[in-house]
Amino acid sequence: MNQRWNCVALLAGLMIVPASLGFAAEPKGRLLFFGVAYDEAPGPGRTIAHYDYAPDNFTRLFQAQSTGLFAEIKCGAVKGDFATKETIAAGLKALPAMARAEDLVVLYWGTHGGTDSSGWSAGLQHGGLMRGAEIKEALAKLPCPAIAIVSTCGSGGFLKQLPEGIDLPPNVAAFCACGRSGSTDNQLDVSLLEGLAGFADRNADGQVTLGEVTEYVPRRIRGLLRDSRSSEFLPVLGRANKVSANLPLSKVTGEHVSVAVDGVWRGATILERSAGKIKVRFLGYDSQTAGGAFSLADREVDEEHLDWPGDHPPIEVERGGSWQPAKVVAALGNKPGYRVHYVGRPASEEEEVPPRRIRFPFGN
């Protein structure tokens, strides 16, 4: 049974991380991550491998921040040339054979997609088509909980609405990037990875649970969309009754910060520290491919552009018709509002602003 999974994993570059030593209560279950990435219709200057980076982002985060919560972390993906319907179907078929009741399966799907009268589907190589019903059928065979992350346009159709609820298998929770007729970029990836990195740890207990991420994602995506108001661009989430909201997914390491770059607050992971400078990698972006639609290279930033965990949450302030990243200097004791400092601007431009000109991009 394991040979079938290993065949798929060989193509994908399967990576295994053992549980950390010395964890107080030795975990029994494993985290099994399976990612799919493929660009069916690449634009000018792109290739079919345009989305290849996305599963790697989740693999890195789980390896760094889920070790110790699971007895083992196994990550595999099919990307670019390997992302055929046959290969993906073989991987999905292998999962129930290798999974155990105490495990957690996470499926990431990063391709083009859309919803029609038959529901959500994604186009693959050689005219291949993978329908949401096929994926849900495979996940329903698992003996353990599963989380499906569908980062495509029209992905809300993956969660078909029924009179009595949503047609998810009883062991599945799903994060879909937008509504049935909506479009999306990388907002779901960004918000999920930020949440798992620690931004979603609302009770500050050092762990991020499924319930906390479920609360964080829609709030953060509203911030990322900024001025968009259409509900079709907001995520569609669902969780069946056999999937606990208290399911722990990651541990907070303290190696994440908010960074103001290009006039926007973004979540980032710290790579290196040096005198007065921090090198960061932005969560949810392609850090390797220059010029890609979702590329944002690793870079050094100074303290002025950082907002550390534990500080007042980063804010945006309406100024001259646009929203600008700012930090809270102090609350106004005699009236609602704050004195704010605009990131990258001199202290002489600090001002007192009322609540109507302030918003919290991370949804805090």
Image: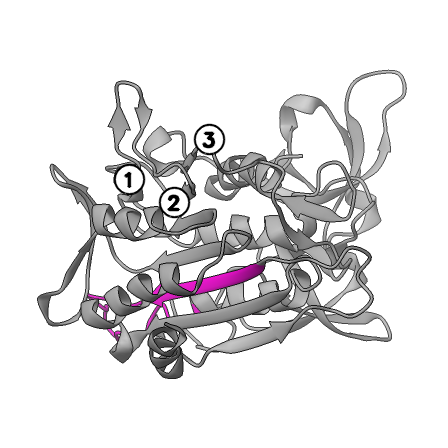
**Camera-side mark, 3 or 1:** 3
Q: Amino acid at mark 3?
A: Asn
Left-right relation of 127 to 130:
left
Q: Amino acid at mark 2?
A: Ala
Q: Are marks 3 and 2 in contact (CB under 8 Å)?
A: no
- How many numbered marks does the figure carry? 3
Residue 9: assigned label: none
Element marked by disc 1: loop
The residue labelled by disc 1 is: 182
Residue 177: assigned label: 2
**Chain part drawn in magenta:** 30-53
Residue 241: assigned label: 3
Left-right relation of 267 to 12:
right
Is residue 34 depicted above or below 189 in this figure? Answer: below
Is residue 173 depicted above or below 12 in this figure? Answer: above
User: How far across and down, in percent of the image, does residue 342 sit?
Assistant: 73, 46
